[in-house]
Amino acid sequence: AQLTKLRDANTKYKNLLKMAKERIEQQEEELKRLRAETGNGKERTDKEERDASGLAGLEDNEIGDGGELSLSIVRVCQRVKVELEAHELNAKGGNEEIWALIEFEVVDPDHADPLSSSAKRTKRWKKFDSETELTDFIRRDTGEPISLPPYSLTPIQSAKIEDDAKKTVAKITEDFRRFRVKSEMARKQADA
């Protein structure tokens, strides 16, 4: 009966260790993907800004209602919530900022050819002081919703998760080692 209990506990610890390793591998792959995406994203953004013929440098008030260019939001590519230091406050008095990478489509109606699209797409980071401010900014007049991606982790949050996962695996590995020693001792006692 005790041997069965030990085997069940051994199986349980093995499964826990396997799950923890899989989780760490998934997180490491996600970190690699995000790091590569961030590096590639910077290169792509620079290229898109050059391709947009300087349109990416225009301010929001220069485009749209009073301007000659039309700007519309295509999608929100990424968003990050940044916790501010205790002595820092955003414009609304909060202690966090939301940064969103927004893809815009810029159209010059004067040069619009009906047979071809003259729209250029560009991405820009934009800062918001609250979630409401972000949703108000991306809301479309047509009522067509723009979906928001989940928050991305900041480098500090990613490092904390990675450290926590490593500590968890180390603890489970040590627990499993202790269990193996106990079960080996119990087996030897049962044989004697």
Image: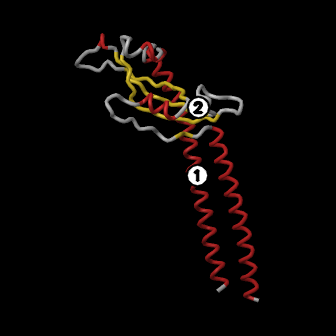
Give the percent coordinates (x, y) of residue 165.
65, 53
Image quadrant in which you'd find residue 106: top left
Question: Marks 1 and 2: CB-CB under 8 Å?
Answer: no
Q: Residue at x 23, y 19 (%)?
A: 115
Q: Which residue is mark 1?
A: 25
Q: Secondary structure at mark 1?
A: helix
Q: Residue at x 45, y 22 (%)?
A: 48
Asked whether, in this view, residue 99 is left or right of residue 77, the answer is right
Q: Where, quadrant-wise, is the C terminus in this rendering?
A: bottom right
Q: Name the residue type under label 1.
A: Glu
Give the percent coordinates (x, y) of residue 53.
43, 13
Compared to residue 97, the image places residue 10 above or below, namely below
Compared to residue 10, the image places residue 168 above or below, namely above
Q: Residue at x 71, y 77 (%)?
A: 183
Residue at the bottom extreme, as displayed: 192
Label ID, residue 97: 2
Image quadrant in which you'd find residue 66: top left
